[in-house]
Amino acid sequence: MFRTPSRSVVRHPVAVGIGAACVLSVLGLNVAAFVRGEQAPWLLGSVIIADMLVVAAGILVAVREVLVAEKRVETTAESARVAVEKSQARLSAIVDSAMDAIITID
């Protein structure tokens, strides 16, 4: 259901450039609003909206990472359960065959 993007996509120069441009534009907007806030109320409103979008994007990324990690844990737990069942079956087969080889002497 959820796929982690490949490392090459995340580290692609275009993706890094777009991310850096977004960060710089939000920072620039915050600085401009701080300096000229009372003269341009629309600037304060746009900063609030931009900051809320950044926080929302961060929350979405965090939720996605948690869901991917949970899926990974479920997969790991399932493979561990299968490995334990195989190990128990092998031990049972060894013990069953060993009983044929045991000779009791009085």
Image (cartoon, rainbow, N blue to C red):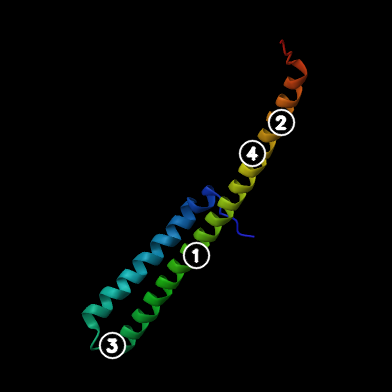
Q: Which residue is denoted by mark 3 in the rendering?
A: 40
Q: Position of residue 53 (x, y in %)?
A: 43, 75
Quadrant of the rendered image containing residue 82: top right
The answer to which of marks 1 and 2 sits earlier in the sequence is 1
Q: Position of residue 37 (x, y in %)?
A: 25, 84
- Residue plotted at (53% across, 52% down): 9
Mark number displayed over residue 84: 4
Front tag of 3 and 2: 2
26 relative position to 61: left or right: left
Q: Position of residue 54 (x, y in %)?
A: 41, 71
Q: Position of residue 35 (x, y in %)?
A: 21, 79
| Residues at discs 3 and 4 in contact (Cβ within 8 Å) | no
Front tag of 1 and 2: 2
| Residues at discs 3 and 1 in contact (Cβ within 8 Å) | no
For numbered disc 3, what is the local secondary structure? loop
The answer to which of marks 3 and 4 sits earlier in the sequence is 3
